[in-house]
Amino acid sequence: MSAVMIGFVVYLMVVLSVGIVAYRRTSTQAGFILGDRKLGPWVIAFSERASGESAWLLLGVPGTAFMAGFIELWTAIGCATGIFLSWTVVAKKLRREVGHYDSLTIPDYFRSRYPETHEFIRIASSLIIVFFYTFYVASQFNGAGKVLDETFGELLLSVKDTLGLSVSTVTMGMVVGAIIVLFYTAMGGFVAVAWTDLVQGIIMVFTCVTLPILGWFMLGGTELLDNIRADDPNLLSMTGGKPLGQAFLGIVGGLSWGLGYMGQPHLLTRFMAIRSVDDIRTSKVIATWWAVPALWGATLIGIVGSGAYGRDFFDDPERIMPFMAQDILPGWLAGIMISGAIAAMMSTADSQLLVTTSTLSEDIYHKTLKRSRSPESLAVFSRIATVVIGLVAFWLAVESTDTVRKMVSFAWSGLAAAFAPGLVLTLWWKRTTGYGVLTGMIGGTLTVVLWNLLGLNEYFTERVSGVAIAALLVVGVSLLGKQERDDATV
């Protein structure tokens, strides 16, 4: 067994052990969905960060920076800003609100907060979550396939030939990643997800910080900049050397990633699950200090790789991170680094599966369909739903030809447009109405879907258009409803 494989196997043993231990401590629906709201600030902070930065962090960001250069740093700036704002603007107020209403999910919170919408707001938000998260989980399985194929391609090929399979080695990598995630998520629920996120978050930030530094010194140092300059000097510019209008759109597109953090249910559940409002300040500091080096480091992995290997080296630039780790590091350390990429996928996929299945079991099956079951039976239903959604996401991953970054962008944008404007305005603007939030959800979702179908995201990002239109709808319909009530009382 190679040193890389040994490092990877040790990592897997740790996360699977956590799943088994958590299974023994998770017997109710509240425990499965939010860990009974008993987790402390360190676990919640690392879980929120590890869940927030998926395979996109160690595959999508380096791959884009590999091809585009320093202009990708605007994405790192936008994300770090969005993380800080989410903890500052949303976390504390949301934790108080869900505690007051005893809500386990975001759809349940909106239904309790706006009873005048009846079940419409619960159903709409639940369907939106299931739709976008199925694509989001598929992107994580896609990322797992790429990493495992780049790292263990020969082993996967040998297994494929031995078993006489006709699938690709990338698909086999997806199978391995999907099985691992489905196992410990279905077993342990939120507790397993949160504690594995703590381990995975440490590995991820270690990889993002260490790999570009070692790569810089071991692959040429300042010569890397000379190589990039010889290839295309515009890669060293934070505007990409583009005309003013194109540069502006590129900068806005990068910064706009930050808009999504306040609307991702798998991150919002971390705020809902923390044991006390007083712990949020500590978690915010930890999460912010994690985000800055991790995001900048992921970008620099791609830039260092571009200078070392050249942009024509890969057919798929999203493979740069696992390739560089194996190229410059001892096998055992490369195994840890590559585990970081797998960790990025797993920590997000498990959280998204958990939110999706929680929505199916708690909001649709239990609350909407009024299927009264014991807490233990609902937990069993949630585990079954986890496997079903995971299988659908796996099928999408196999069938999709999109990059990890493109799939993540679509799902991230849709969730941001559906939930961020309505949630922020609910928490901070007293005139917000339930029908305003509902209209914003639907309008933001349709905007993102149509933006992609029409190809408009090639010119202007759907992350901005979706959030902007949703915000206008929430405000407009809320004001209209307020005016109608005022007129009725005259």
Image (cartoon, helix red, strand yellow):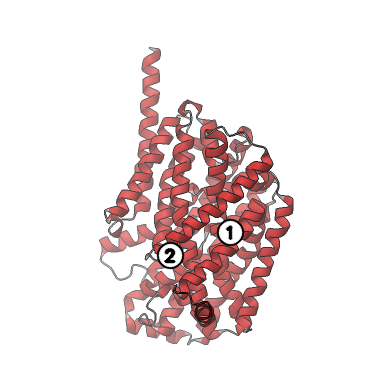
Q: Is residue 49 visible?
A: yes
Disc 2 crowd rating (10 Å Cα; few below 14, some 14-19, many 20+) is many
Check the image and report above or below for 173 versus 393.
below
Mark 1 and mark 2 residues within 8 Å of each other at the beta carbon: no
> Which mark is on residue 88?
none
Q: Position of residue 490 (x, y in %)?
A: 38, 12
The three-letter amino acid code for the residue at tag 2 is Val
Q: Is residue 97 left or right of residue 424?
A: right
Give 461 or 395, whichever is nearer the viewer.
395
Task: Report crowding for label 1: few under 14, some 14 to 19, many 20 or more residues within 10 A (C-alpha).
Answer: many
**Horizontal and vertical percent for residue 23?**
70, 54
Determine the CA span between mark 1 and mark 2: 16 Å
Residue 432 drawn above or below residue 177: above
Residue tagged 2: 398
Q: Mark 1 vs mark 2: which is more N-terminal?
A: 1
At 40% across and 75% down in the image, what residue appears?
317
Disc 2, SS: helix
Amino acid type, callout 1: Leu
Which residue in the structure is indicated by mark 1? Answer: 182
- Of residues 351 and 13, which is closer to you in this image? 13
Camera-nearest residue between 3 and 392:
392
